[in-house]
């Protein structure tokens, strides 16, 4: 009996300690499925390649064929083999948040996502995962956006998040501390961020840094009270290998969900970048803004996460 009592006390103490870790942050929220996360972990979470001054950090290429624009922009920042080595596991993070068609410009262009998958596999990636934590029903969002099928046909493993795919991570941010994160953004060798340029009703825009909301479980709407700081915390936590920005179609109003084709402008542009602050600063110009006018972009630059002046970071524009 005494041994059973000691074992019970030991298990109880462990459970209380874990609860204290989560509860003490004030930021433990249930996911769509309750109490399913593994214990808190702290893990390296940055994936960038070393800075190479021979390449610009932000390149915009313009062509009516998105794959051609991508290839020009990618070649100008060093080519796919600068970012992906044989045998590496790659996770690609498009925006697949909404039950919308590609023409409505609420999600990343599926043609671009598929091409990025092919390029990674050609570079020797052992596996390419394409996933996102959608705002709408994920099955409908992955299907109607066209990204699920396009990525699958290109050779990717397309993952619709399940309850067992989330882990608690200490993100070590000012606002974001312990939070459920989709494990595919932790257990990977390379991370490619593929946002679309959109107006956003709360943060003015959603481009690269804001796109990382899609790595989180839990009640993300709770973060909207300090949305700029939460975006900066995400940018500090999740530093990608490469940012590929879809500005082929730009949702200039009615974002982030969109719906009306009247709010979409054709820009036929793709940006490849190794500086997520500078690339957001350039991209927001499609919305008639400057980087310093957007709270989270200016705050991220102040935090040392990248350069607000994209030209100072090294900028090149290619019109094919």
Image (cartoon, helix red, strand yellow):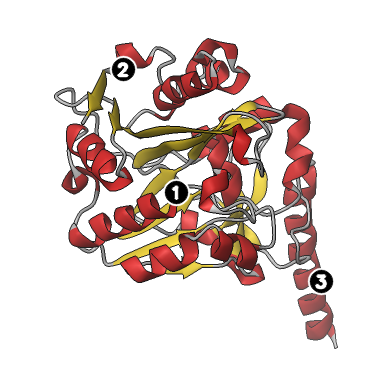
Q: Residue at x 62, y 68 (%)?
A: 139
Please, which residue is most extreme toward the bottom here?
Answer: 1
* Mark 3 lies on residue: 9
Left or right? Give the position of 217 relative to 64: right
Secondary structure of the residue carrying tag 1 is loop
Closest to the observer, 313 or 207: 207
Camera-nearest label, 1 or 3: 1
Image quadrant in which the N terminus is located: bottom right
Question: Quick one: label 1, few (<14), some, or many (20+) residues within 10 Å?
Answer: many
Q: Would you name the residue on which mark 2 appears? A: 313
Q: Nearer the viewer, mark 3 or mark 2?
A: 2
Circle 3 residues within 10 Å: few <14, some 14–19, many ≥20 = few
Q: Quadrant of residue 311?
A: top left
Q: Which residue is mark 1?
A: 109
Side (left or right) of 320 relative to 312: left
Cα distance in 3D space between marks 1 and 3: 54 Å
Question: Which is more N-terminal, label 2 or label 1?
Answer: 1
Total labels: the figure holds 3
Find residue 97 and name its label: none
User: Disc 3 or 2, which lies upstream in sequence?
Assistant: 3
Where is residue 241, by image quadrant? top left
Q: Quadrant of the C terminus?
A: top left
Q: Residue at x 44, y 15 (%)?
A: 308
Label 1 or label 2, whichever lies nearer to me, is 1
Q: CA separation, marks 1 and 2?
A: 26 Å
Q: Secondary structure at mark 3?
A: helix
């Amino acid at each position: 009996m005494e041994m059973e009592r000691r074992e019970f006390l030991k298990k109880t103490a462990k459970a209380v300690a874990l609860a204290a870790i989560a509860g003490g942050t004030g930021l433990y929220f249930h996911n769509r499925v309750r109490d399913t996360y593994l214990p808190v972990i702290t893990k390296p979470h940055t994936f960038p390649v070393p800075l190479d001054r021979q390449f610009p950090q932000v390149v915009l290429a313009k062509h009516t064929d998105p794959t051609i624009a991508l290839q020009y922009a990618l070649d100008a920042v060093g080519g796919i083999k600068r970012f992906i080595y044989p045998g590496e596991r790659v996770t690609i993070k498009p925006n697949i948040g909404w039950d919308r068609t590609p023409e409505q410009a609420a999600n990343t262009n599926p043609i671009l996502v598929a091409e990025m998958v092919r390029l990674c596999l050609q570079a020797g990636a052992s596996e390419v995962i394409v996933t996102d934590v959608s705002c709408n029903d994920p099955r409908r969002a992955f299907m109607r956006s066209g990204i699920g099928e396009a990525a699958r046909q290109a050779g990717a493993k397309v993952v619709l998040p399940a309850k067992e795919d989330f882990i608690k991570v200490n993100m070590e941010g000012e606002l974001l501390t312990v939070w459920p994160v989709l494990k595919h953004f932790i257990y990977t060798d390379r991370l490619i961020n593929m946002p679309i340029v959109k107006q956003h009703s709360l943060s003015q825009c959603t481009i690269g840094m804001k796109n990382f909301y899609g790595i989180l479980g839990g009640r993300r709407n709770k973060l909207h009270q300090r949305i700029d700081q939460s975006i900066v915390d995400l940018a500090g936590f999740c530093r990608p290998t490469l940012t590929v920005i879809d500005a082929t179609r730009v949702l200039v109003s009615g974002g982030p969900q969109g719906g009306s084709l009247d709010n979409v402008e054709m820009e036929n542009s793709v940006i490849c970048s190794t500086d997520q602050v500078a690339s957001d600063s350039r991209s927001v110009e499609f919305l008639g803004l400057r980087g310093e006018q957007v709270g989270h972009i200016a705050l991220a630059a102040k935090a040392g996460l990248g350069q607000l002046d994209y030209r100072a970071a090294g900028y090149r524009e290619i019109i094919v």
